[in-house]
């Protein structure tokens, strides 16, 4: 069983690396192919997609991972169909919104939103299939699906650029069209069809979980984006550039964290009734320890990098980025320390608890980032963010221990009753 789990975590990490690398390569190709204004339009469309895919996961994919991982086919297959059908509905509604917004805007932003509106349903369905495969303990199917999307989108983008058709609209259509093709492959891989007619029922049955996940997502994203906007207005553009630069340098740790979470959430969920309180805590320790240790080691490498190498990586941004690197490593370690208990709490179906902690973290992030940039520029902002994460870190461990005891006690009573 351990060998199977190791293989699954390897496939999960491979899928996350493939997905992230493809997105980075796509952004690089588009940036080199279009004007600065058109790249701005592409960035707006990609930001809208990123927000909507997060919302879609909260209402469609996460309930599947938490509540149906490990269920037999009789229960899982209709749940998977309803989950993907809900993502399709979210994509259709969001696509209509993008089409309306795009028709009201001029220039590259309007063109980009119009193109996104056409392909958004396919993008969200493709993403939903990935989580079906994770919940079904078939991450290799997600890798195959993402690999097809990667090959098709990069090939289409290169073909458009070679034909001198590399403007923002066609490029976005190529990107999303490739996702639609991968979504069709997902139909064959899963052996079920999306059930959009079940979306309302799915939302109603799982609203007790989804509402907390939605609020959590909006709270965290809103707090961070508002903080960055304030930092940009109060501080300097170089401060924002440095914060973005350090995100690029430490990005592999983020990829590791996402990959570990996509593996661990369904794995723990399917064992919810069998784990003792001690094993829940040990699982959380293992997850946090792995990501924190690897993250600190990766960040430490850049502390040893000669300035000439740093400038090759980030250009002029390296000078400011290198100054906030230590604070950013500490910040990322604070986030990684919370990863294990957060995943365990999600797997226990305790999203209400995670929301309560994130509701405290979000304003702390805002106050730390904005207050930090006022006091000490980019370095102050980075230390402010780090302080916010470490301030709530103990709370995560207190709550996971408490909820693990409650769940283990309830499971013992259940087994005794049967």
Image: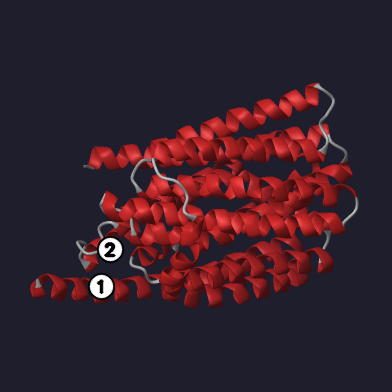
Q: Which residue is mark 1?
A: 407
Instruction: Provide the secondary structure element on which disc 2 rests.
Output: helix
Q: Which residue occupies 81% across, 31% down?
A: 166
Q: Which residue occupies 78% across, 49% down?
A: 114
Residue 168 screen position, x and y as percent: 81, 40
Question: Could you tell whether 236 is left or right of 45 in the image?
Answer: right
Question: Could you tell whether 399 is left or right of 313 in the image?
Answer: left
User: Distance of mark 2 from mark 1, alpha carbons?
Assistant: 10 Å
Q: Which residue is mark 2?
A: 280
Query: Badge 1 local density, few (<14 within 10 Å), some, or many (20+)?
Result: many
Q: Is 73 drawn above or below residue 177 in the view shown?
A: below
Q: Quadrant of the C terminus?
A: bottom left
Q: Nearer the viewer, residue 306 or 344?
A: 344
Residue 224, quarter of picture: bottom right
Q: Quadrant of the N terminus?
A: top left
Residue 352 screen position, x and y as percent: 44, 76
Q: Which residue occupies 28% across, 63% down?
A: 280
Q: Nearer the viewer, residue 128 or 304?
A: 128
């Amino acid at each position: 069983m351990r060998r199977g789990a190791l293989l699954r975590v390897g496939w999960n990490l491979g899928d996350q690396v493939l997905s992230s690398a493809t997105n980075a390569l796509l952004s690089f190709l588009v940036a080199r192919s279009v004007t600065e204004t058109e790249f701005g339009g592409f960035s707006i469309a990609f930001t809208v997609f990123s927000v909507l895919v997060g919302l879609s996961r909260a209402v469609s994919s996460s309930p599947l991972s938490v509540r149906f991982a490990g269920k037999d086919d009789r229960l899982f297959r209709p749940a998977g169909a309803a989950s993907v059908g809900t993502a399709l509905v979210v994509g259709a509604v969001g696509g209509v919104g993008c089409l309306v917004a795009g028709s009201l805007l001029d220039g590259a932003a309007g063109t980009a939103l119009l193109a996104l509106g056409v392909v958004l349903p396919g993008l969200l369905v493709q993403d939903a299939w990935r989580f079906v495969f994770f919940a079904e303990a078939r991450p290799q199917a997600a890798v195959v699906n993402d690999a097809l999307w990667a090959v098709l989108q990069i090939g289409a983008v290169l073909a458009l650029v070679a034909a001198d058709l590399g403007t923002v609209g066609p490029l976005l259509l190529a990107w999303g069209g490739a996702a639609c093709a991968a979504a069709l492959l997902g139909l064959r891989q899963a052996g079920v069809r999306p059930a959009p007619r079940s979306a309302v029922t799915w939302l109603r049955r799982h609203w007790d979980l989804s509402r907390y996940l939605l609020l959590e997502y909006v709270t965290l994203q809103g707090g961070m984006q508002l903080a960055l906007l304030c930092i940009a207005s109060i501080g300097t553009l170089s401060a924002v550039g440095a914060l973005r630069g350090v995100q690029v340098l430490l990005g592999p740790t983020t990829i590791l964290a996402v990959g570990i979470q996509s593996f661990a959430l369904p794995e723990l969920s399917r064992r919810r009734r069998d784990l003792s309180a001690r094993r829940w805590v040990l699982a959380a320790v293992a997850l946090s320890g792995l990501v924190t240790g690897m993250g600190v080691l990766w960040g430490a490498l850049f502390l040893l990098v000669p300035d000439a190498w740093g400038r090759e990586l980030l250009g002029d941004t390296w000078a400011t980025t290198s100054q906030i690197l230590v604070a950013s490593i500490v910040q990322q370690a604070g986030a990684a320390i919370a990863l294990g208990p957060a995943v365990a709490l999600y797997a226990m179906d305790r999203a209400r608890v995670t929301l309560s902690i994130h509701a405290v973290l979000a304003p702390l992030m805002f106050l730390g980032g904005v207050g930090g940039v006022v006091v000490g520029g980019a370095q102050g902002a980075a230390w402010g963010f780090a302080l916010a994460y470490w301030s709530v870190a103990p709370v995560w461990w207190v709550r996971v221990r408490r909820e693990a005891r409650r769940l283990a006690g309830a499971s013992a009573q259940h087994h005794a009753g049967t």
